Image: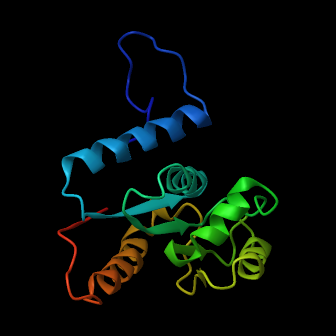
Amino acid sequence: QHLGHVKSVDHAPTHNLQDQISHKIAVLDALRERHPPRTRFIIVGHSIGAYIALQVLRARPAHGIVKLYALFPELHSIAATPNGRTLQTHKDKLVMYYGRTDSWCPLDHHETMKSLVPDAEIYLCDRGLQHAFVLGGSEKMGEIVSAWVRKLQQPEQSSPPEEIVW
C-alpha cells in the first residue's frame, strides 16, 4: 500500500519520500502487533521502494525482518551514508536483483554493490527482465521471488517460526 495512491476526499497534500518511509514503518509496526512474536517478515522493494525498504529495516532492525528483496534497486550512491552501514550490518538479510539493460539502475550499480557488500546475495538478471518488469514481466519476477521465499521457508532450525509474512 502506498500512501497517497488513492483518491483523497479531503484534498490532502501530496506526500514526500520521508512520508512514504514513515508510512511503511507504521505498517510494519501494525503487522508486528497483529502477529505472534516469532513471526518473520519479508520486505520486497522495487526501484526506490528498495530504498524505502532499507529505511524500514534500518528503523526496525528487531522487528523480525529476515529478508529484504531489493528488485532493480536504487541504492548505489549510499556507501558513504548511514545506509551504507545499514547494508553492511544487515548483509545477511539482503537479496539484490539487478537488470543487465536497466537505464535507471545501470550495470555499474550491480558491480558497485558487489564490491561494497560482497557477502550479500546480489544477482544479475539472466531472464531479460526490465526495470519496469511490472508492465510485462511480473510473472517471471514473481517466480524468482517465490523461489527465494520457498528457499527461506526450508527448515533450518529445530523450532520453526510461527509464520512468515510478506
- Is residue 152 shown to the viewer in this render? yes
Residue 122 in the image: state x and y as whole percent. Answer: 61, 81
Q: Residue at x 20, y 68 (%)?
A: 163
Q: Residue at x 62, y 74 (%)?
A: 98
When the figure is inspected, residue 90 is found, relative to residue 2, above or below; the finding is below
Q: Quadrant of residue 114?
A: bottom right
- Image: 114 above or below 141: below
Identify which residue, 134 or 117, lies in the foreground. Answer: 117
The residue lying toward the viewer, choosing from 74 and 164, is 164
Pick whichever, 106 or 160, lies toward us. Answer: 160
Name the residue located 68 percent from the left edge and 68 percent from the top edge.
Answer: 102
Residue at horizontal 59%, vertical 57%? 47
Q: In which quadrant of the rendered image does the C terminus lie?
A: bottom left
Most distant residue in the top direction: 10
Q: Quadrant of residue 156?
A: bottom left
**Residue 106 spot, x, y in % from top left:** 75, 69
Q: Quadrant of the N terminus?
A: top left
Q: Position of residue 151 (x, y in %)?
A: 34, 86
Residue 67 located left or right of residue 30:
right
Label count reads 0
From the viewer's perspective, is 119 left or right of 151? right
Q: Position of residue 113 (x, y in %)?
A: 72, 74
